[in-house]
Image (tube, helix red, strand yellow):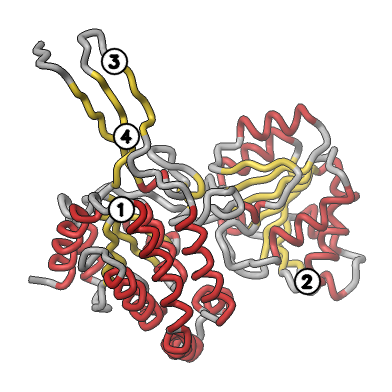
Amino acid sequence: MSEVLEKAQRARAAARVLAGCDAAMRNRALAAMADALEAHSAYLLAENALDVDDARAKGTEEPLIDRLLLTEPRIADIAAALRVLAAQSDPVGVVTEGRTLYNGIRLRRVRVPLGVVAMIYEARPNVTADAAGLTLKTANACLLRGGSLAHRSNLSLSSVLCDAGTEAGLPAFWLQSIETTDRSATTELMGLHGLIDVLIPRGSASLIRTTVESAKVPVIETGEGNCHLYVHEAADPAIVVPIALNAKTQRPGVCNAVESILVDAAAAERFVPPLLVALTAAGVTVHADARALALAQGLGEAVSDRVVAAVEEDWGTEYLALEVSLACVGGLDEAIAHINAYGTHHSDSILSRDYGAVSRFISEVDSAAVYANASTRFTDGGEFGLGAEIGISTQKLHARGPMGLEALTSTKFILEGDGQIR
């Protein structure tokens, strides 16, 4: 039997036991897991350092290194997130609907675990802890397939978390990681219909596309983030540059960072030069359309050296780096059409003091999170008050946007009668 099949079967058996574990036990396990991360931080950092060294030797870009890197403060943050999770309300068993039917049967709809949740992810060891914590809180078994770049980090985190949970009373194999680096294991995992209840991919666009196209099990699509910032002609000049800088530079390697800026052509002379000066001073390379490129002239070499002519592929690119595309558009209609055509339905923002323009943007931009006069960097489970998240869904069925606890549950109908027949 292959490693993947064996672990999936073990996860299925663990899921049945977990469904009967009460909230108090699961919360004690979460607290024990947080303590274990801090107690074993030296071991975790040593394993992570080996992954980081290998990644740098392979020429991995710095934004990916940043995603891969663990530090003492980051481990402390991960542990703190598990403790916050333990303190959150338990969604399992919550009655979402209750009534008595015409025939006297008493009906309740209650939240229940999904069962076995599998994840495929790349270069982000913190996802290991997030997935373990969220699936445990919702009484799901968890099967993880991390990327080769973070192989040691993921396995060490998984081992520490699993042992801590098991010692706290959880069933064996409640959390498992696929250890082989053979790519065929990923393909096999995608095909385990009947053993895996839901598969969640997190990573590159190609990983997500391959998973969606190849999986035989239900998939929650967590899309790439080609996020937009639209500067309407009625934007408040005082907020344009600060929001653009925050959305692009605060952490460029994450999916809610802005990758494309649109500016109304009618206000281009007011807004484009200050944007170019601020962005290039922050080290950002700007892929500009013809109008913006012309406005870059005369701003000095420090600016013009970092402003290059955009090509068609720039409008659909998720850079995950200090790069951004910038285009001048003919107004609100063109901005909305551009975002819906090139965006990834993740997070998009309008800057405007015109209520009518804001209202139309919010209703017509087809994204999971739509902002007005704010940075897109807030699309995050913690920032939304949902606690830790297992991903950001860009699809419309079951879950959309940051996926917290409720997204990892389903519902079942419970009907109690007194001998009724139909």
In this rendering, the label closer to the viewer, 3 or 1: 3
Residue type, label 1: Ala
At horizontal 30% and vertical 53% (from top left) the residue drawn is 139
In the image, residue 102 sits, relative to residue 61, either above or below, namely: above
Question: Are the residues flagged by discs 3 and 2 in contact, CB closer than 8 Å?
Answer: no
| Label 1 CA crowd tier, 10 Å (few <14, some 14–19, many 20+) | many
Residue type, label 2: Ala
Residue assigned mark 1:
139
In the image, residue 179 sits, relative to residue 231, either above or below, namely: below
Comes first in the chain, label 3 or label 2:
3
Q: Position of residue 2 (x, y in %)?
A: 12, 71
At horizontal 23% and vertical 58% (from top left) the residue drawn is 190
Residue assigned mark 4:
110
Q: Position of residue 273 (x, y in %)?
A: 87, 58
Comes first in the chain, label 4 or label 3:
3
Q: How many numbered discs?
A: 4
